[in-house]
Amino acid sequence: MPVLPAVALAALLATAATPTPSPATASGATPSRPSLTLGSGRNSVHSQGYTLHFSAIPTTALSPAVAAKAGILRSSNRALLNVALRKGRAAEAVAVAARIEATATNRSGQPQAVRLREVREGDAIYYLGEASIEERDVLSIELVATPLDGAPPIRAMFAQEFWPEGPAPR
């Protein structure tokens, strides 16, 4: 079983205690609070033998040590976008390098291009980027992942709701 990279593991652990997301949107993506649940199948898109995995969390969900190691600014007005592309069936899937384009649009309709940087740790390849958020913000995130092996682009859309520090209102 492969070892998860430190930043990916921290992001996944931050999502593990979150509530299950609401039903999927027409695009197959799922809005949730404050990040998507790992393993729900709702934080990935399958296409042409590839699986595009994605999540967005507040940067404050990362420990200071993990954030510093990854060069991520921990702030209540920053979100971390984590994207990975894998090829093959789940157990045998391998990481694939890709050109990833991301746009995050806030609830006011203001788009921001999210600049993603590639991170390689062992056999893992993932892409990290940061977006600005406001208190109680919702980001609609559009992804286009083009595998560098020549396969056609894979598109995904998902919405992510962000709450201020502390429990979500009932």
Image: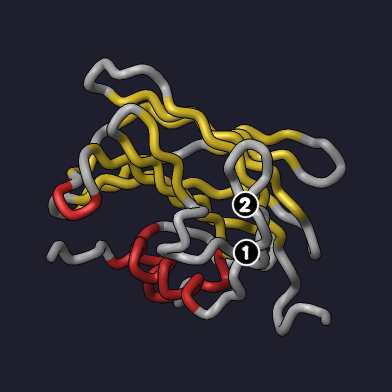
Q: Which residue is mark 2?
A: 30
Q: Judge left or right: residue 148 versus residue 7.
A: left
Residue 64, image x and y in percent? 45, 75
Q: Hey, which residue is sitting farthest right in the picture?
A: 108
State the residue position of label 1.
Answer: 21
Callout 2: few (<14), some (14-19), or many (20+) C-alpha neighbours within 10 Å?
A: many
Q: Count the marks: how many?
A: 2
Give the residue drawn at x 55%, y 65%.
Answer: 59
The color scheme shown is secondary structure
The three-letter code of the residue at mark 1 reads Pro
The relative height of residue 159 versus residue 143 in the rendered view (above or below) is: below
Residue at image location 82% in from the left, 79% down from the top: 169
Q: Quadrant of the N terminus?
A: bottom left
- Secondary structure beneath disc 1? loop
**Residue 135's image quarter?**
bottom right
Q: Residue at x 41, y 63 (%)?
A: 39
The amino acid pointed to by label 2 is: Thr
Q: Position of residue 7 (x, y in %)?
A: 35, 63
Above or below, comparing residue 164 to residue 155 in the picture: below
Regarding mark 2 in the picture, which secondary structure is present there?
A: loop
Percent x, y of residue 13:
42, 74
Q: Disc 1 or 2, which lies upstream in sequence? A: 1
- Residue found at x 75% / y 53%: 138
Whether residue 25 sits left or right of residue 156 in the image: it is right
Classify residue 5 by image quadrant.
bottom left
Q: Are marks 1 and 2 in contact (CB under 8 Å)?
A: yes
Instruction: Report, in whole angstroms, how far the alpha carbon at label 1 lies from the one at label 2.
Output: 7 Å
